[in-house]
Amino acid sequence: MEKSFKYFVFALLGLLLYSCASIGRPTGGVQDMLAPVFVKSNPAPEAKNVTGNKVEIEFDELVQLKDQQDKVVISPVQKEPATVKAQGRKIVIEFKDTLLDNTTYSIDFADAIQDVNEGNPIEGFSYAFSTGDMIDSLQISGILLDSRTLEPQQKMLVGVHMNLDDTAFYKVPLLRISRTNGYGQFTIRNLKAGKYNLFAINDVDRDNKFANPTEDIAFYGVPIEPSATSEMKPDSIFTAEHRLDTVIIAPHTHYLPNDILLSMFNENRKSQYLVKDERPDSNKFYLEFAAPADTLPQIKLLDYEPEKKDWYKINRSMTNDTITYWITDRAMLKMDTVKVEAKFMRSDTLQNLVQGTDTLLFKLKKSKAIKKKKNKEKEDSLPKIEFIKYAITTGNTQEVNAPIRFKFEIPLDSINQEGLHLYIKKDSLWEKTADAILLNRDNDYNLHNYNIEYAWEPGASYKLLIDSLAITDIYGLFNKPIESEITVKQLEEYSDLFFTINVRDSAFVELLGSDDKVQRTAPILNGTAEFQYLNPGTYYARLVIDRNGNGKYDTGNYEKKIQPEDVYYYPKKLSLKKNWEVTENWDINAMPVDKQKLEVIKKNKPTAKKWEDKTKKKKKDNGEDEDEVEENSFGTNQFQDSKNPFSNQR
C-alpha cells in the first residue's frame, strides 16, 4: 500500500514537472468586432427644457474619439467651438456659447466614437436635446460624390439654410450641419418643418459658409421640404449573446427625402500669383503661376537694350501657368543677371484679378567646376561640332493610328520639309512614299514636340530619312543625318470596342486605365461610341454629358446656378484580348449613380476596421481573392429600412 502511494506521488510530480516545462503559445480570446453600446446620458436623449451647458454620454466600455475635428459637428453652428473629449467610458461635451431658447441641439459624431482596444467605431451616432418644450425631429439624407470622378466625398460639411436668399451661402454660416461618412453619405437631423436650401462645402477655413471661392462646393438647386411617414413593421429583439429573442410589430418612421444626390465641384477660381521665377540656364528663364491664365505676362528688359525686339521665344503650357522664355540675344546669353519688368494678372484680397507689376532679377546659377582628370589627353585643336538634340519617343514599333513623335531639346527655328523622306519596304526593296511632313503637334504653344502624321499600312516596315541641315534650332544648330526604321503593328494585335448607349444628346466617352486616368476619348454619334486599335488589356469607361458641346468636361458655377456636367461610369470591367471586337450595351440609368464606379478603381474608401485588415491579410497570405467591399445603400437611417429605391435625381 505504501509502495503504491509512493508510485502515485512520483507519477503526480512527474506530470506537474512536465506541464511546467511545456511552453505553449497562449490562445487569445474571441476577436472584438463590436462597437461600444450606448448606456445612458445626462441629459437623456431628446430631453426637453435643458438648461445646463454640459452633456455626458456613457457607453458600456472604454471609448476614444478619432478625428473629432473632422467628424464631430454641432447644430446650430457654435460661434465658439464646444469642448468634446473622451473620459473613460464617457464622452463629455461642454458648450462655450450660451444655449439659445426653444432650440433643438444635435451632436453628430459620424464614426468618431470608437472602443479603445480594437478601434471599432459606432457608425452614425448622434445625440439631441432641446432647450424648449418640444424637439425638432425631421431629417434629410443623401450622398455627396465628386462630380468628375464619382468618388465619395468623405468628411465634407453638408448643411442647410432656411434663409432661401442666394447670397446666404456666401454671407451666413449654415444653420444645421452634418458631415459625410466614409461612403460619402450624410444625414442632417433634427430639422423643423419648412423649406431649406441644401449645400456641401470643403470648409477649409472652417467658417461654415462659401466665403472662400477656392473651396469645393455642391448645391441642390431647389428648396427641400423634409417630411416623415410612419408604418408598422416587424422588428427583431436579440439577447445579450446576439441571438434572436423576439419578433414584434413596431412603428417605423421614414424621413424624406432620403435619396438626395449632391455633385461636388470646384469653380477653378484659384488664387493667382507668381509661384516661381528662376534662370536654370544661361539661355532661358522660367515663370510659374498658381493658376491658369487667359493672357501671357507683358515683359520688358531693364538696364539693357537688345539688338532685336523679338529677343526671346516662348514655350508655354496650354493654360499659360508655366512659361519658359528662351533667350535668343547673343549678348544676353553671357550676362550673369537679367533684369525684367513683368506685368501680369494676380488675385487681390477679395480674390478679384487685377494687374500687378513686378521687377524680377534672373541670376544665372553657377555650375560646379569640373575636376580635371589626371593624365588628361591632349585636346583636339578643332572645335567640337554640336548638333540638335532630339528623341523619337514612339520607338521602333509603330501604332497604326499614331504619328511618329519627336521631342527636341531646344525650340526649332526652321524645317526644310524637302529634306524629309519616307520609304516603305516592298519585296525587300525600299520604295519612296508620299513626302513626310514634320509639324508641331501642340499648336505652337509647346515648341519641343513635333509629329510626322501618315496613314500607316498595318504590318508594313518603313524607313524615315532626314537630310542633314534640314532642321535648325533657334541657336543655329542643325541636325546630323537621321535614319530610323519602324514596323507597324498588325491589325490582329489590336482590339476594337464599341458602345451602344441610350444617349442622344451631345456627349463623349472616356476610356480609362486601372489608375482612372483617361487613355482615349470618343464622341457619341447616333448613340454609338467607337474605340479602334486598342492594345489588349483592362479598361474602364466614363461618360460625360457635354451640355455645351465643346468636347470637354465643364465644372459648375454657384453664382450662375450652373451644375457641373453629369458623369456616369460603365459598371463593368472591360477585359480586351488580341483580335477581339467587343460591343457593349450601356444604359446609363440602369444602376444608381453612386453604385456605378467599380471598387477596384475607387480611391476614397471607408477606413477598414482592425479585424477587417487582419482578415484581408489572412486571405492574401492564403492566396485568396479579396472580396470587394459591399457599400451600404445610402439614403437610409437608424429609423428606416432600405425599401426605398435610389431615385436618380439627374
Image: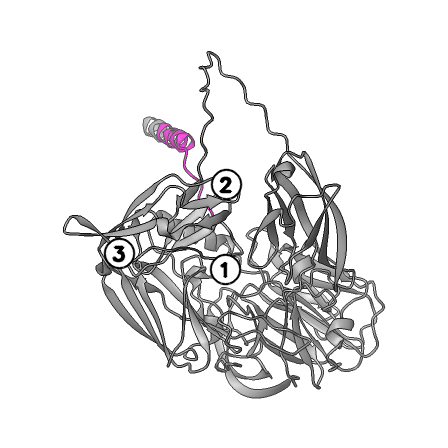
Identified by mark 1, the residue type is: Asn
Where is mark 3, residue-wise? 433
Question: Is residue 287 shown to the viewer in this render?
Answer: yes
Secondary element under disc 3, as helix, strand or loop, is loop
Residue 291 on image: x %, y %: 64, 58
Question: To which quarter of the image does residue 304 belong?
Answer: top right
Q: Earlier in the sequence, mark 2 or mark 3?
A: 3
Identified by mark 2, the residue type is: Gly
Question: Is residue 31 shown to the viewer in this render?
Answer: no
**Between marks 1 and 3, how big is the CA–CA gap?**
26 Å
Secondary element under disc 1, as helix, strand or loop, is loop
Of 449 and 432, the residue lying toward us: 432
Identified by mark 3, the residue type is: Thr
Where is mark 1, residue-wise? 443
Q: Residue at x 48, y 43 (%)?
A: 409
Q: Residue at x 45, y 23 (%)?
A: 382
Determine if the magenta segment contains residue 25: yes
Residue 36 on image: x %, y %: 59, 60
**Quadrant assignment for the N terminus:** top left
Q: Where are the magenta residues, as a range?
A: 9-28
Residue 210 on image: x %, y %: 72, 69
**Between marks 2 and 3, how big is the CA–CA gap?**
30 Å
Q: Main secondary structure of the magenta part?
A: helix
Drawn side of residue 485 relative to residue 247, left or right: left
Of 479 and 456, the residue lying toward us: 479
Q: Residue at x 50, y 66 (%)?
A: 149
Where is mark 2, residue-wise? 476
